[in-house]
Amino acid sequence: MNGMREARASGQMRGLVHRWTRKVRAARRDAGMVTSEYAVGLLAAVAFAGVLYKVVTSGAVQSTLQSLVSKALHASF
């Protein structure tokens, strides 16, 4: 009786491993970007970095950051 249980458990485990392996291989085929997608993604990242740089270096944001740092340095504990 134990032998049948072990064989059934072994078969179930083999089935699980087989299904998992198929899913991993299928995901691997679709993973990554092609060159054109990579170029568009890179342009979007550079554009976002440019906008973020402009925002952070603006006068209003710089004065706000400076006041926050000043308050943090002069805070009493």
Image (cartoon, helix red, strand yellow):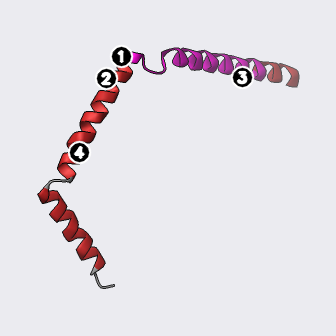
Secondary structure of the residue carrying tag 2 is helix
Q: Residues within 10 Å of mark 4 (few under 14, many from 20)?
A: few
Q: Decide whether the magenta segment is chiefly helix, strand or loop.
A: helix
Q: Amino acid at mark 4?
A: Leu
SS assignment at label 3: helix
Q: For residue 29: magenta?
A: yes
Left or right: residue 26 versus residue 3 is left
Residue ID for mark 1? 36
Q: Amino acid at mark 1?
A: Ser
Q: Which residue is mark 4?
A: 52
Label 1, residues with CA under 10 Å away: few <14, some 14-19, many ≥20: few
Residue under pointer 3 = 13
Compared to 63, does 72 lie above or below? below
Disc 4 or 1, which lies upstream in sequence?
1
Q: CA distance from mark 1 to mark 3?
A: 41 Å
Residue at 26% across, 70% down: 69
Mark 4 in CB contact with mark 1 (< 8 angstroms): no
Pointer 2: what residue? 40
The three-letter amino acid code for the residue at tag 2 is Val
Answer with mark 3 or mark 4, whichever residue precedes in sequence. 3
Q: Quadrant of residue 65?
A: bottom left
Q: CA distance from mark 3 to mark 4?
A: 51 Å
What residue appears at the point 19 percent right and 70 percent down from the top-left corner?
A: 67
- The x and y percentages for residue 31 are 49, 20
> Mark 4 and mark 1: span between their CA atoms?
24 Å
